Structure formats: C-alpha cells, structure tokens
Image (cartoon, rainbow, N blue to C red):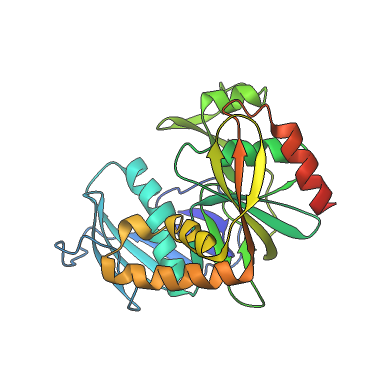
Amino acid sequence: MFAHSGYQLHIHSDIQLWTEQPIDSPTVRIRIDPHLYVDATVRHLRLNSQVAAGSFRGIALYRITHSQILLKPTSRLDVVARATAGPLLGTLLHQRGVAMLHGSAASKGGGVSVFLGPHGAGKSTLCALLGARGYSFISDGATAVSFSDGLRALPGPPIRKLNADSLEALAVGRRDFRRAGDKYIVPVEAPQTNSIPIRRLFVLSRGKGFFVKRLRPAEALGAIFANMYLAPYVSVQDTKQLFRLAGMIARCVETSCLQVDDTFQSIDALFEFMGGVDD
C-alpha cells in the first residue's frame, strides 16, 4: 500500500503513483481489482456522470467515482501508474468540480503563474528555472484549478519530470533520478497544501528572443480550451463541459502568449518581467 498526497487529496494506492508521503485518513482509494467487470467497448473518459467506467487505451479497465478508482491492469504496472496519476485521477478531480489544465505552475508573492503548452513546450524546465530563483513549486505538467473562492490552484504531486537537456540547463546530474520514458523524475520539496489564487496564465511558444503579449478574450478562450488536460481523452459531447470550464477560467484570469528561445537564454528577461509583477 502506497500513501500519496496531491491536489488536496490523501490517497491510499495499490500502485505507486509518485513519491510517497505520510498522510492522515485517506480521502481517495486506488485499488487493483482482478475481477473488475466494466463495458470494455467504452473508450472515452466520461465526464457527465458520477461514475466513469471503461477501458483506457488498452492499459487498464477502470471504474472511477469521486473517492475511488478501481483498476484491472492490461499493461505493465508502470504504464498503469502513469495513466492513473494522469487522466484517470484527472477524471476523479473533475467529478469533484476541479478542472485540469495541461500546464506547470509556480508561485511567488501569494499568486500563481501557470504555463500552458503541449508536451515538449518547456513548461517543466521553465518552472524549474524559476524555482532556482525563489519561486515555489505548485505543479508539473498538470495543474488542478478550483473554482471555490475565485480561481485557485491546488498544489500537485511533489515531482518534476525533466529531460536530460533540462537537467543540464539546471546544472543537475541525472545519475540519481529514476527514468520514466524520455524524462527523469526529480523529487521537489513538499509543496504547501493550501490552494493559492491564480494570478495569470501564459501560453508558451518557442522562437528567437523573449516577448509577452496579452491575448484578447476570444484568443484566451481558444488557448485555454486547447490546453484542457482531459480534452484528448473524452468524447466530442463531453468536450462541451471542458469548453464551458475554459470559458470560466478565461473570464477570471489574464492570459498572455509568452515566447522564450529554445535554449532558455531569455530566462533573465522573463525573470525580470515576472519579478516586476510578483515582488
């Protein structure tokens, strides 16, 4: 049995999802059930009910409620763990009224900045570089957004996933880190557990030099919707729910396009810009 904390959940799990942490009484249980029976023809995660069940990409059969995930693995356990810690747990959070963004987040001065973008955009590297300059870790790769008391980020699992180039940019060796796919799992200091107001969103792009451009409302809505974490896994019908959530987020927070260069040499300019707002 593994004990985990993240997204304000206390989890007891039959499979290890990320670094273990001591927890109080569990609020979510993840169990392997070799006798689990569900409709394996259901291929999309369902968001419009209190129970989601089906087959997830040939990795596992699953049944999700707001406090439990049952699994019947059909692939390697490390693959099942990644799916569970990502889209399946994201579905459970959705049932609890929490939206998931495909982004990494860092905080300073009582507010959170969330960096959105697809795989390889540099979200984790950018937040790690900010972390080396005094920003606090909030999340890596997936940011949970609560709508209670304004728009707030829920601190995620205390790990970063960094590729070899990112570790080199941070002057960190990779020998001591476990590898998962093309990235290394880097533990971070346990983040705070309280939710924190989201101050702004940045949509990452790569190019020559550094610039920030605030997006118009329609542009912001499109960019946020494109980075809803669960969008690739749900049916067309359920994307309507994600579009509605994207609209709620767009109305509550400033969204900008942020361009950085491929080698992150513009990090000084970014840090100066961020410091001018966050300090």
Q: Nearer the viewer, residue 132 or 207?
A: 207
Q: Nearer the viewer, residue 64 or 44?
A: 44
The answer to whether residue 252 of the structure is visible from this angle is yes
Q: Is residue 128 above or below residue 63?
A: above
Rendered-image quadrant of the N terminus: bottom left
Direction from residue 81 to residue 278 in the image, left or right? right
Residue 276: image x %, image y %?
83, 48
Q: Is residue 138 above or below residue 8?
A: above
Q: Is residue 154 above or below residue 124?
A: below
Q: How many marks?
A: 0
Residue 74: image x %, image y %?
22, 48
Residue 3: image x %, image y %?
53, 55
The answer to whether residue 134 of the structure is visible from this angle is no
Using the rendered view, name the quadrant where residue 111 is placed: bottom right
Using the rendered view, name the quadrant where residue 24 is placed: bottom right
Residue 255: image x %, image y %?
61, 58
State the residue at coordinates (27%, 66%). Answer: 236
State the residue at coordinates (56%, 28%). Answer: 262
Direction from residue 192 to residue 278 in the image, left or right? right
Using the rendered view, name the quadrant where residue 204 is placed: top right
Direction from residue 85 to residue 269 in the image, left or right? right
State the residue at coordinates (66%, 40%). Answer: 211
Q: Is residue 65 above or below residue 262?
A: below
